[in-house]
Amino acid sequence: MVRGRGLITLVAGATLVAGLAAAAPAATAAPAAGTGATAPGAPGAPSYFDLARKDCLGTAANPGSKVWYTVAGGVLSDVYEPTIDNTDVSTLQYVVTDGATFTDLQARDMTYTVAADPTGMACTVTSTDTQHGFRLVTTYITDPASDTVLMNTRLQARPGSGANLARLHLYARLDAHVNGNGGGGSANAGANSGVVDPSGVPVVFSTNTVTNAANRDYAVPTYMALAGTSGQAASVGYAGTASDGLTQLDTAHTLTPYTSAPDGHVVATESVTPGRGHEVTLALGFGRTQAQSVSAAEGSLHRPFGQTAASYRHGWASYDAGLRPPPAREASLAGRYYLSANVLKASEDKTFPGAIVASLRVPSQPLGPVGARRGDRRRQAVLLRLVPGGVRPGSVRGLHRADGRRGRRHGQGRDAVPVRPPAAPGRGDAAQLAAERQVRPGHRRHPAGRGRLPHPDGLPGRARR
């Protein structure tokens, strides 16, 4: 089945494209052979970044919650934490089975539509399985009080379908590339490891903080835990192998749990079949240790989703209230104006204020083999700048009633353009632009004069203008 291709268009000035308790089935029984064992099949299939074309994005307006989410292809896509250049997720999506006759994967077997709230920062995706008569309605936000992405999902029968929801089993499948890694072995770059925590929560992590990018010395060990309000059996395994939960569900419509999957392309699968009300909330929590990530995820679930969502939306409403309103003659564009301002705000890092990426995305490509030249597996961001005065691409300062900050820039991923200090005090924007046009060592000018190409040896390159 061809999946839907919903797209939110984000506009800035012109156009900025960003944009069952008793009735529930019991947790699927797992064969004893897999329980408590190390998953077979390492290192798994090659790991890929997800779609660069995003349906929507979001983060809490406050600086304390350092996690960003994106949605692409109707499912959770790149999630960045603890900095805006550090992607940790390929996809997090649902798998639905009746336990006997079919298994459907959200991105593969369903169509979808996307809608955003007035701020543009809370996203709701409706995924429809026409053949089997049900749909999943999922709202995505981040927890303003924690480094956690929250997904609230309602399982519904399509009108007139007569679908028996009590017969359906719902699983969440997390395809990870924590810290921008996700492979392992000769055909992949880097590696993740996965375990099922004693609490029953699956955790995927990377402790590799080595980077090839000059001046990028702020990488940290990252752990990512997946918890749910109706979490049941959980497993970790290697993508595309017999230990991958999707492979098991496609083949036998049941999950065979494994509790350890070291050094490879790791996927985590968890049974999250909801109880009465057919509603479940998932929490993807982050931390520098396993315990911290599990605590973040479970802590976010202790608060009702509606309450957290209200706090999240209030944060963005308060931010918008502090912006200069658009001119009265442009009142019809007010919604687009605030949406665009929010996208620019959401694109700013929270550890390095003033560092802004042009887009929360990573170009779709395989992670290169271990030992490959950097140029073969580089991920480069197009960067925006904070400049004095005026509202124009690369500037958010002009939107604020009062803001005296100058910006710093930094790049995307492990092969990043390094963080650079702001211009010296007293330099005007014209002088700064002229200085930036100078060719720096290790760069050569584009033949058409529109920027610089990466050095043949893979040294950090500048994005083309």
Image: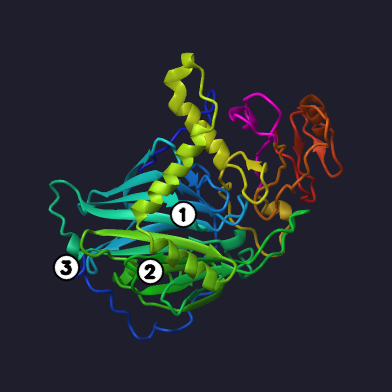
The disc label shown at residue 23, or none: 3
Q: Residue at x 45, y 80 (%)?
A: 198
- Nearest the eye: 465 or 248: 465
* Alpha carbon distance from label 1 to label 2: 21 Å
On screen, residue 442 above or below 87 = above
Is 407 situated left or right of 266 in this image? right
Between marks 3 and 1 in the image, the one whose residue lies nearer the viewer: 1
The amino acid marked with disc number 1 is Asp
The amino acid marked with disc number 3 is Ala
- SS category of the residue bearing label 1: loop
Q: Residue at x 50, y 47 (%)?
A: 59
Q: Characterize the magenta stretch by its predominant secondary structure.
A: loop
Residue 204: image location, x then y, percent: 52, 68
Residue 171: image location, x then y, percent: 34, 64
The stretch of residues the image draws in magenta is 380-404
Marked residue nearer the N-terminal end (3 or 1): 3
- The residue that mark 1 highlights is 143
The disc label shown at residue 270, or none: 2
On screen, residue 200 above or below 152 = below
- SS category of the residue bearing label 2: strand
